[in-house]
Image (cartoon, grey):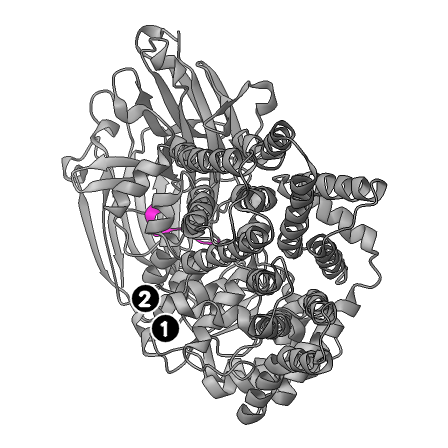
Amino acid sequence: MIKIFFDWLDHHPGSFWLIAFIATLGLLVHLVRLIKREYGDRPPATTAAPWRLDALLLFVFLLAWRWPFLFAADEFNPDESQLIAGAITLTHDPVFWRSVDGTTSGPLNFYALLPLHALGLPLDYFTARLTGLLLIGGALTFVWLALARSYDRATAWLGVLPVLAFFATVFHPDLLHYSSEHVPLLLIALPVWLLAGRGPAEGRRLYAACFIAGAAPWAKLQTAPLALVLMAWATWQIWSQPSAKRWTRTAWAGLAAIAPTFLTALLLLVTGQFGTALRRYFIHNLIYVSQNTDRTIGEALQRMKEASQFDGRVPLLLITTLTLTISTALWCALRRRRFSAFFLGGLALTMMAAFAVITPHREFLHYTLLLPIPLALWGGAAVGLWRQTLTGTRFRYVFAGGWLILGGLLPLVTRARQQVPAVYGRFAYDWRHPRSPVAMLVHALSGPQDSLGIWGWAPSLYVECKLPQATRDAHSVWSILPNEQQEYHRTTYLADLRQHAPAVFVDAVGPGAFAFEHRPQQQHEIFPALTDYVSANYALVRDLPEARIYARKDNPRLAALTTYQIDLLLAKGRRAHSPSILPPTITPLEQLAKKSLDGRSVTMVLPPTTVEWPLDADVRSITLEYGFDPEAYERGNSNGAEIILELANLTQSRQIYRRLLNPSHEAKDRGLQSTKVNLPPFGPGTHLILRTTAGPFGDNAWDWVYLAGLEYHRSPGFLPTQFPGFNRAPDVANAEVAGFISGTDGEQLMLNAPATLAYLLTGKERRLQFEYGFLPGAYRDGGHTDGAEFRVALQHPGQADQILFHRLLNPGRNSADRGTQLLQLTLPQFQAGDRLVISIDPGPTGNAAWDWTYIHPLTLE
């Protein structure tokens, strides 16, 4: 059922806009009714007005725009994986800093992921992003309640609307992932609600606000300035009222503010982690901030500005909200009108949030998530001032309508002009492939009670494999990069690794890895003590460009995995989703027309069109996304067109895929089509050619075919899917002409002579068996093959080849050579590292024109 639903979503991206439109319409109707009632001649609703409907509409609206991102299987940011990995580890050992180090993130961000897990949800990206949405929705609800308590419901909505629209329409990955800013959002909004009202907060509300504000730095130390503003606001409320107990109440407020730190320190002392927390959280944060002092704040802000252009949400929020607040401040100054405590509090919080954003001198866009809640408070106070100042229903309606358009509808309209979430087209694929290739192999080598050790920066492996960290460091950044505490981090890293002895160790350093791509300077071998430990206790399972996977030598799953099974696991892994949909091509695609369909830019390839791409040797398969412009069969009358893929070299070409699309008569041919094509072995200088041809009768009227994407899938070794019927893909395959054909036993691999397959032997192989022969067309119906020579040889380094099998097939002359032949061979003694080579050579004349030879199936075990 889920598969059918996800497949439907992939082919109906318009469903996103429909769901968003329905939720937006419902909210808009609610807002118009509130504004009409509360901005008219009637007095505004009291603070006792019902709020549950408003809270529900707020979250439904937020969810309607953000739900697709919950289902993306990839991490949006490595920090997201680090937080989930830490939460997974805490379910095995709940003592923070003993089992998990959050580096610049405090423990509250990790523990916040556990409530939904306790309700039965797995600790994965879905649960983390849903937690983030709940925290955002909760924070906005508490700001709304604060504004409604001080003004009215309509003013509260107009105040939070720009921030709500920001969170709903954002699609920059750095602003979508569950980050260390989400818990602070709620910890800032809660005190605001507790301190809000038409009078000072009293008793428990005031002390609770101080307690929560004091807890904020334990989510993110960066929020300490905002916590200080909230405490100052509480103190001002105490001293703004005449009372003989000012000093007593101030003392109690101070005790409430430091209570979270006192309780945390007590827990750290009891668990023996006080010194560790001091060193890893406070000292490390100071080191982190001081590292980038050579970069100016202006440079960091410039890079942040460039990053924000991806979706434009942050600039739009700042422009609209600051336009309102600054114009309000100028108007009040000119009219000599007093600013409300809310307005000044919002201003102070916004300034401290901006200070927290720029202090680290880094361009990480997710830091800006500290700004929206203060901006909502400040903007809401500005709306409240205009609401109280404007006289006459008409002026209030004009102001409310104008701000509804500028602060609410403008972000939604600009978002509607952009693309649908990128997860559309990948729902079903991500559901079927929840793990990357590396994670597939790690998962196969580990059990539910095991842990995982990682050198480098790949916390996504913990999440995809549901394994706890073997080291408290989710990544080894501070063990790799030079810093004041490098030796300390290396010592604790190795001690943790020895203590937990993970079933699998991954060195996530190499080309294509995140952050660390240079093995000579960054691989685990730069730490000699770690090298000795890994060498003594772990065996290398597979060396991939982006990672080396090791298994503990006594791991029972290691012996059970054959080379073929490893290849199959890697092939089944989820391919990376690249934002670049088309690789570089010889044909200048910019000369072809572009069009936007369902929010996606596509290239029109109207028949007859030919596009050509060079192929690198490590490309193993491709995914082609294409389709028909709906207008061609809804308004026009297309009779279909063909999509053809070919592999070509200097001498010849061979077809690898062909499909007739006829959307006017076949419903399955409508919408975006996606096809994965496995490539047969090919030689250097091979190109991939895409051709579109007119349908029946050569009629290309209305043949509006488009190309939406072409993605290369690369692998250092051949994939099992490239060799159907083989129990093991070869390590080397050379064939000038190769392709897949349909036989009685399924798909077969045709290898025209000359061709060579080579296997690097592990020492465990004992027999070789395969079927081979000629396609009938090579010697019948005009075929003129002069035969081909099949040979199997064992190659020992430094020695002559040992011929194990040799036979010349000439089906044109000898009827016994026709049909499928069978080879069964027991291998002689050999050493690990020897090579088994299967070759097919042209017949006596050397003419390979009709050498339509094949091998299928093949077993080497």
The location of residue 323, given as percent across then percent down, is 73, 39
Look at the magenta stretch and give its main secondary structure.
Answer: loop
Q: Tag on residue 368?
A: none
Residue at which label 2 appears: 120
Task: Select label 1 or label 2 by which is in front.
Answer: 2
Q: Give the range drawn in magenta.
A: 716-721
Looking at the picture, tell me which residue is in the foreground, 276 or 154: 154
Task: Give x and y (percent) for residue 313.
Answer: 62, 41
Residue 129 visible in the shown view: yes
In the rendered image, residue 670 lying in the magenta stretch gets the answer no
Q: Tag 2 or tag 1, which sits nearer the N-term?
A: 2
Residue 717 lies in the magenta stretch? yes
- Residue carrying label 1: 446
Check the image and report above or below for 171 versus 825: above
Q: Quadrant of residue 629?
A: top left
Left or right: 755, with 770 as reference point = right
Quarter of the image with the C terminus in it? bottom left
Camera sees residue 315 = no
Q: Is residue 67 above or below residue 21?
A: below
